[in-house]
Each structure stands twice: as structure tokens, then as C-alpha cells.
Image (spheres, rainbow, N blue to C red):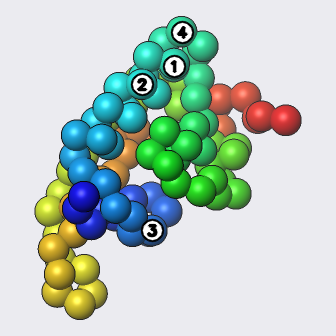
Amino acid sequence: MARCLDEWSGRPFKSNINKIAVAVAELNESILSDGEMMVNDLYDLLGLDPNASGHHLGWTEPLTVKFTPMLDKKGRPILAFSFVETPNNNARLRQ
């Protein structure tokens, strides 16, 4: 497992590029079948805790992520990923 960084929430976690890509593919399958998914749905697929914004923001179109190798504040390598399509509140609010 590598050190990864979710740039949208700013939190680091342990994973790898393949696991993130599989989670995004699963999320996109759900978007195509259900019409929408929330940010916290992706976090759940990644094994991450939900966050407050992720409950209200999401996607109605398939998501693309961008991977960027970076150095953290201590100069250690970390794999950052970001959402190409910004999460929005066009997806219905979950109760």
C-alpha cells in the first residue's frame, strides 16, 4: 500500500492507484445504473470515513480522476488524486 492523498478533502490514506481506479469504476457503474452517486459513496468504496460535504455533493455523470505524484510537507512521496468533474449538488440530497 502506498501513501495517497485525496486532494478534495485534503486527507491522506493508504491505498494504491489500482484500488482507487477500481473504486471509481464501481462508482461509475452505479452512476450509470442509478443516475447519481455522492462523494461519500466513493469514500465508502475506498474504505474512508464519510465527510459532511460528501453527503450532499456528488455526480450525475461518470467521474474521472487525475493522479499526480507529489511530495508531502515532509518531502515524502505521496500519490494525490483529484476529481476532474467537480462534485456538485445537482445530485439529489440524500436523507
The quadrant of the image that shows the C terminus is top right
Callout 1–callout 4 Cβ contact below 8 Å = yes
- In whole angstroms, how far apart are the C-alphas of marks 4 and 2? 11 Å
Q: Is residue 50 visible?
A: yes
Amino acid identity at mark 3: Arg
Residue 75 is left or right of residue 38, and the answer is: left
Residue 78 location, x and y as percent? 21, 69
Residue 44 location, x and y as percent? 55, 43
- In whole angstroms, how far apart are the C-alphas of marks 1 and 4? 6 Å
Label 3, on which residue?
Answer: 11
- Classify 10 Å Cα crowding around label 4: few (below 14), some (14-19), many (20 and above): few
User: Which structural element holds mark 3?
Assistant: strand
Vertically, is 40 above or below 73?
above
- In whole angstroms, how far apart are the C-alphas of marks 2 and 1? 9 Å
- N-terminal-most mark, 4 or 3: 3
Q: Nearer the viewer, mark 2 or mark 1?
A: 2
Residue 31 - label: 1
- In whole angstroms, how far apart are the C-alphas of marks 1 and 3? 24 Å
Q: Is residue 39 visible?
A: no
Amino acid identity at mark 4: Ser
Q: Nearer the viewer, residue 68 or 16?
A: 16
Label 2, on which residue?
Answer: 26
Q: Quadrant of residue 92?
A: top right
Amino acid identity at mark 1: Ile
- In whole angstroms, how far apart are the C-alphas of marks 3 and 2? 21 Å
Q: Nearer the viewer, residue 45 or 80?
A: 45
Residue 3 location, x and y as percent? 27, 66
Label 4, on which residue?
Answer: 33
